[in-house]
């Protein structure tokens, strides 16, 4: 295959990706939602009994040019005797010639319930709580359309740069063996953007999970979960997973994503407060973005 032919294929791929983004306004699916849910839902801020900092990345080892990559930094902590939470995060997404950097601060308020649940002797889960969260931030949106080299088309005759104020909301109900949440990271969409020719939509996320534990197998917990994402102009996306945890020392899992890929993950809890999770997304024959690797590192103070 000649270098010129490879370049043509790459250009066509990037054009397809950018067209797909412009029509459907796809946003990150966040495969790590089980291990860093705060980046999806502000109601998780301060949900643990101590501050937590996390770093995650996804897609950086993919060798397909223009494939999606995501990098996030987050920190959140409980305040006022765990009745409230504060947090902040920075997320950077890139796909094709489109990049988006979002920064926000978050606040949550919690209502506690006196409900006892059976749980493993080695695992401490959050209280039975109903939490409400809100975020405020800004998004920087860039499309370097001139890099595509497309001429005689007014849609591609200039780069797009915009600053967009954002506001998000979320709600979470959490028990020792069950959790359910919904969130909308940007309910404002592009209404307050610095330019009026954008067409950004607001994704909605729903997720739930269960923690199976029996007295017969006290070292093992099974955790099925699912994430659903709806965005105007795009099909409903589902990320369904199941993981097996051994005494909170390590866990392994697998799952399926409706965009025609399979998830694999492995987590190691090397120290009492340190967590390292690696996950791999294997694209099936109908996928166009190939295989992706991701890493999450989290520390509880």
Image (spheres, helix red, strand yellow):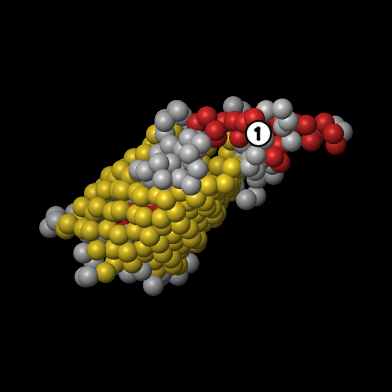
Q: Tell me if residue 280 can be seen.
A: no
Closest to the observer: 15 or 286? 15
Q: Toward which corner of the image does residue 210 lie, by quadrant?
A: top left
150 on left or right of 104: right
Left or right placement of residue 201 versus residue 291 in this view: left
Residue 283 pos. (x, y %): 59, 35
Element on which disc 1 rests: helix
Spot occupied by residue 17 in the image (x, y as percentages of width and height): 61, 34
Q: Write the residue at 43% across / 37% down.
A: 201
Residue with the most extreme right position: 2
Whether residue 172 appears in this view of the structure is yes
- Image quadrant for the C terminus? bottom left
How many discs mark residues in the rendered view? 1
Q: Give the position of the N terminus as an image quadrant.
A: top right
- From the top left corner, tell me how far across and down residue 89 is, in percent: 44, 59
Q: Which residue appears at 65% of the width and 34% of the height?
A: 156
Name the residue at the bottom extreme. Answer: 301
Which residue is more in the foreground, 243 or 110? 110
According to the image, label 1 marks what residue? 156
What x and y, as percent, mark residue 113?
14, 56
Figure quadrant of residue 76: bottom left
Q: For this rendering, which residue is in front, 238 or 38?
A: 38
- Which residue corresponds to the image point at 73% horizontal and 30% vertical from the top-left? 151
């Amino acid at each position: 295959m000649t270098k010129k032919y490879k370049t043509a294929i790459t250009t066509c791929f990037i054009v397809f990706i950018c067209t797909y983004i412009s029509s459907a306004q796809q946003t990150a699916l966040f495969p790590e939602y089980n291990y860093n849910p705060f980046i999806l839902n502000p109601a998780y801020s301060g949900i643990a009994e101590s501050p937590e900092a996390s770093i995650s990345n996804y897609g950086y080892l993919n060798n397909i040019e223009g494939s999606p990559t995501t990098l996030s930094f987050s920190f959140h902590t409980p305040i006022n005797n765990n009745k409230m939470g504060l947090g902040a995060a920075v997320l950077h997404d890139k796909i094709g010639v489109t990049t988006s950097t979002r920064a926000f601060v978050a606040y949550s308020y919690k209502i506690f319930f006196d409900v006892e649940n059976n749980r493993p002797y080695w695992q401490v889960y959050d209280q039975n709580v109903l939490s409400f969260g809100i975020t405020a931030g800004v998004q920087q949106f860039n499309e370097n359309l001139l890099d595509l080299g497309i001429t005689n088309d007014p849609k591609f005759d200039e780069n797009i740069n915009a600053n967009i104020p954002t506001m998000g909301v979320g709600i979470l109900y959490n028990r020792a063996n069950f959790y359910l949440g919904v969130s909308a990271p940007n309910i404002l969409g592009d209404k307050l953007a610095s330019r009026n020719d954008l067409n950004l939509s607001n994704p909605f996320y729903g997720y739930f999970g269960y923690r199976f534990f029996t007295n017969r197998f006290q070292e093992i917990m099974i955790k099925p979960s699912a994430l659903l994402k709806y965005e105007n102009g795009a099909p409903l996306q589902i990320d369904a997973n199941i993981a097996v945890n051994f005494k909170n020392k390590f866990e392994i899992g697998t799952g399926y994503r409706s965009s025609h890929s399979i998830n694999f993950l492995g987590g190691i809890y090397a120290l009492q407060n340190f967590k390292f999770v690696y996950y791999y997304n294997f694209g099936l024959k109908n996928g166009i973005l190939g295989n992706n690797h991701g890493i999450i590192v989290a520390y509880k103070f």
